[in-house]
Image: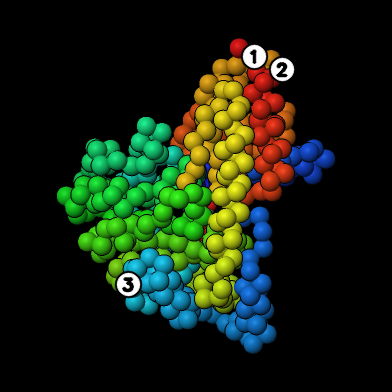
Amino acid sequence: MKFENKRAAGIKSSPSMAIAMAAKKLAAEGRDIIDLSLGEPDFEPPAHVADAACEAIRKGRVRYGLPAGTESLRQAIVRKFETENQLHYTVDEVIVANGAKQILFDVFLATLEPGDEVIIPTPCWVSYGDIVSLHGGEPVYVQCGLDAGFKMTAERLEASITPRTRWLMLNSPSNPTGAIYSAQEYRQLADVLARHPQVLILSDEIYEHILLNDVRFVSFGFACPELRERTLIVNGVSKAYAMTGWRVGYAAGPKALIAVLNKMQSQSVTSVSTVAQAAALAALTGDQGFVTKAAETFAARAQIMSQRLPKIDGLDFNPPDGAFYAFIGVAKLLGMKGAGGELISDDTAFASHLLHQFGLSSVPGTAFGAPGFIRLSIAASDQELEGACERLAAMARSLEA
Ligand SMILES: Cc1ncc(COP(=O)(O)O)c(C=O)c1O
């Protein structure tokens, strides 16, 4: 029996999830595996988050919520944008969803006509393209390699816009590269966008707080206020507060767009779990010390990678400015052979060999539209990161031409 329609058949399961599952299976079989495939903080959210959720349950705040999110959480999100990003939104210009991921579903479900194009600067997060395709859109991948600091440039943007372009996706700090756009770089894009009023901008700022050095984060909305009426800022509590499993994301944008997203939510999920929203409210309004401390922890871990990886022959490593990933060039090692004669033909073969022969789980760059790279999450203990670098070095040493 064939169950899938064309749309479902046209997309793949999240590659990072698939690799994480393979790593878990090997670990369950007793193999010593360091799993650096998934992107989630490896510590618990602050205690007041769980307390708020328990209180919501005890006090019976467990009925259906509003599709756009509880009034109090949306107010807290409005305040977050005010204080952290100097962006001014009203409560009916923000929406809460089951993770930033669901915001993307709502957006493309509501706004794309078949064949509409969505420009995705690449390397990009694994899910953007498939979520676009699933909703009948055409992902337009624009290579923004190391030569461009892994960022979209004005020239590349201009060249990729067509009359069918509906959205431009931006993601800073970036998963997988850790690149962060400056206000000036955003302004250069804004000059191009000014000439193309049909293009909407989705700025995914979910790694806003994970800053690894002195490069500052700026919201696209702050850098380009004149584009406010066609910009959607997407964020969430997953990464900043280590709340990946609570599934709370949010977005801010023009009222009419938020109203359409609200309609999508009302006919799909009804509302995000009100218990999870109580937890997210506590995260956004409680003591923010956790966020700073988490960023410091990630910065120290990035340092470990920056000290170790450049010493491994055959790898190219550009230290990330933000997010919690090491994006490592392995192109020089491709075409070589493992000790058992296996050909390491591409980054997928490289990642597979690294997992099966050396017990280190990574995500091949191809999953991010960037062949010739692998991504390691640095959301792991110092010990695991040291071990990962040793395993990577051992594999690099073992390869022969
Ligand atoms: C760039 C980017 N955007 C969005 C998400 C999804 O976040 P959420 O947990 O809020 O759905 C992720 C998760 O890995 C991500 O890396």
Q: Left or right: where does residue 246 sit relative to residue 386?
A: left
Q: Position of residue 206 (x, y in %)?
A: 47, 57
Residue 96, image x, y percentages: 46, 70
Which residue is outermost to the bottom?
59
Residue at 52 percent across and 29 percent down: it is: 316
**What residue sits right under mark 3 in the picture?**
88
Q: Which residue is mark 2?
A: 339
Q: Residue furthest top?
A: 401
Q: Along the polypeptide, which appears first: circle 2 or circle 3?
A: 3
Q: Amino acid at mark 3?
A: His
Graded by Cα atoms within 10 Å as few (under 14), some (14 to 19) or many (20 or more), the crowding at tag 3 reads some
Foreground: disc 2 or disc 3:
3
Q: Is residue 226 visible?
A: yes
Q: How is the image coloured?
A: rainbow
Q: Quadrant of residue 158?
A: top left
Tell me the residue at 41%/54% (across/down): 216
Asked if the residue at tag 2 contacts the one at tag 1, i.e. Cβ–Cβ closer than 8 Å, the answer is: yes
Label count reads 3
Residue beneath the point at 46% across and 76% down: 76
The numbered dot on residue 400 is 1
